[in-house]
Image (cartoon, coloured by chain):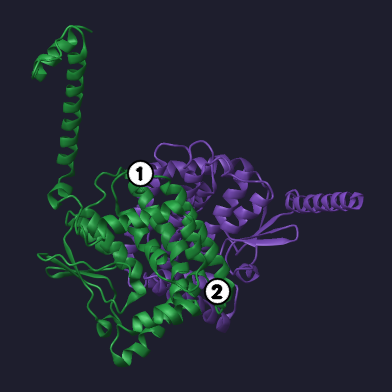
Amino acid sequence: MLGRRLGFAFSPHRVSDSSGNRHKVCDTDTFEAYAKFSGAKVTVSPIDWTWKTLTATVPELLCGDSAVQEATQILNFLRKQRFNADYELTARQGADTMAYIALLEEKLRPALLHTFWVDAENYANLTRPWFASRSPFPLNFLVPSRLANIALSRILLTKGEAPLHRITEVEGKIYSDAKECLNLLSYRLGTADYFFGNSPTSLDAFVFGFVAPLYKASLPSSPLQSHLKQLDNVTRFCDNVLAVYFSSDHPCPTPPVQETMDANLQKLTQLVNKESNLIEKMDDNLRSSPQHKPHRPEPKPSLASDKSSTPA
Amino acid sequence: MNVLVVSLSLSLSLCLLVCLFLTSTAAEPWPETATLYQPLKEDQILLSDCASSLAVQAYLRMCGLPVQVAYRANAEYMSPSGKIPFIHVGNQVVSELGPIVQFTKAKGHSLSDGLDDIQRAEMKAYMELVNNMLLTAELYIQWCDDATAAEISRPRYSSPYSWPLSNILAYQKQWEVRRKMNAIGWGGKTLEQVYEDVSQCCQALSQRLGTQPFFFNKQPTELDALVFGHLFTILTTRLTSTELAERIKSYSNLLSFCRRIEQTYFEDKTS
């Protein structure tokens, strides 16, 4: 099952994630991915809070005295606590992040809700048993159908054209929107590992949170899933994130917390490294040039740079 | 053998004919009588409808397609999707910006043909950002802020109708919008949070626009039309509080962007 829950032993934060409430499956995964990208140590506790979460929202982040809910707000909270995966982005890329998140919310979410909650076959074979198995006795009859009703009314209210429209009239539209959205993501991702170059950002966390459940769940019927599986780069992206950030073999391959907290220092060291590489290269050139003996053991960099100016 | 060839060529020519017919209906020229319908301008239309309508008008003007604007008190009920605005072209009726863009594209008028795949993805993403943030914020302020709803939205919305019906329709609309807000999680937001969202959205748009004349440099696209429609309407509409317009006014490049589009596409027609 997706979103394997990993616990880190000495952690100041705790996340309550009612696994009985899979309605927010996207949000929880988004958040977890983000926490891992930014190197924050977080315990994810899949507590069965079905009674409590009948009214409350998940995921919820508990840190000290404060509790934060909903993926976007938790991400903001983590940012304030200096666990930020977006340090390296320019302002323009930050704007792009917002825009793509809006795209996911508007185009992909309705189709995902429909796939998991409204599609009769998926609901009966996958979602309902999954939820019922995690809820205590009297509630396991109520919770799934209640959540299914919420999902259905959300789709109808946001995508239904006139009040009292039936779901069949909306289905075609939301699925074509969702397919278009997946295509656009695929174009945007191209051949890169992550959406903004080599390191993951909050946009990657959001995309992963939306796409991975669709990719990994064994749905009995889903045209959207088969469409997704044709988009090689998006599925590769999901596999990659799962392997690097969610596999139990290397629980936390993210850079250690201090490094992410001090990205500027990191940049500085990178610069210094680059420069020393350059110096070495110059050194090599000097050594291979005829007026120097190749066997000289260790020329001093200062000497080398002095001499590099003379032959030119 | 001969018979086969003859029948093959026959079917081929038939195919050609059908294709010709299809393309000719799709590429039917834009008629002079194309009409855009929206609610009464002076005393009925609300901020969000006005913004959507202006966006469509800006888009059609950018395409160079003439359209007459007709004001009808029952425009909302005339529209096939129940949303404002809709256009009536030849014997077809299309509503909302997205479908209208597709419709004009089928007629051979498109603004986004010059973009590559990644740029088109970006354009779609920003359009969803505007719909997700600005449009929702407009609806929220109109119907969920009690002062605005009581002073402006309900009286204006129900202005064409007489007493018992006016109240029923206005409250029904308000109830509908509030249900929608609850479904997308905006129900619990305060007005201040909504203004903050608008600010964030404008900041993103402002960053994306930078110093370029349009979002994708020289050529206007449907994104420019949509952004213009919303920002210009917010800037020029009087509400109970000027806070919403103030939030936008702090981004100078968005202001000059609105002015530029207004001058290029709207002023020469009126003078």
Q: Which residue occupies the foreground of this view, A276 or B38?
A: A276
Left or right for A310, reference B5: left
For residue A203, the mark is none
Q: Which chain is purple?
A: B
Residue located at (21% from left, 11% from top):
A289
Please determine whether, in this image, residue A90 is positioned above or below residue A130.
above
Q: Residue furthest right?
A: B2
Residue located at (37% from left, 61% from top):
B241
Q: Which residue occupies the foreground of this view, B35 or B80?
A: B80
If the image is split into quadrants, where does the C terminus of chain B sit?
A: top right
Instruction: Specify the subunit that label 2 lies on.
Output: B
Observer able to see residue B229: yes
Left or right for A234, reference A288: right
Please determine whether, in this image, residue B249 is positioned above or below residue A14.
above
What is the secondary structure assignment of the residue under circle 1?
helix
Q: Residue A121, image x and y in percent?
A: 49, 79
Residue located at (23% from left, 8% from top):
A312
Marks 2 & 1, CB-CB < 8 Å contact: no
* Other-residue count near label 1 (Cα within 10 Å), few / some / many at <14 / 14–19 / ≥20: some
Residue located at (57% from left, 74% from top):
A162
Please determine whether, in this image, residue A57 is positioned above or below residue B238.
below
Q: Which residue occupies the foreground of this view, B116 or B243?
A: B116
Left or right for B106, reference A20: right
Instruction: Specify the subunit that label 1 lies on.
Output: A
* Other-residue count near label 2 (Cα within 10 Å), few / some / many at <14 / 14–19 / ≥20: many
Q: Residue B174, image x and y in percent?
A: 47, 75
Q: Which residue is mark 1?
A: A92
Q: Which residue is mark 2?
A: B158
Q: Residue A1, image x and y in percent?
A: 33, 70
Q: Could you tell me how far apart the alpha carbons at marks 2 and 1 are, in whole angstroms? A: 43 Å
Which amino acid lies under the numbered mark 2 shown in the image of this protein? Ser
Q: Which chain is green?
A: A
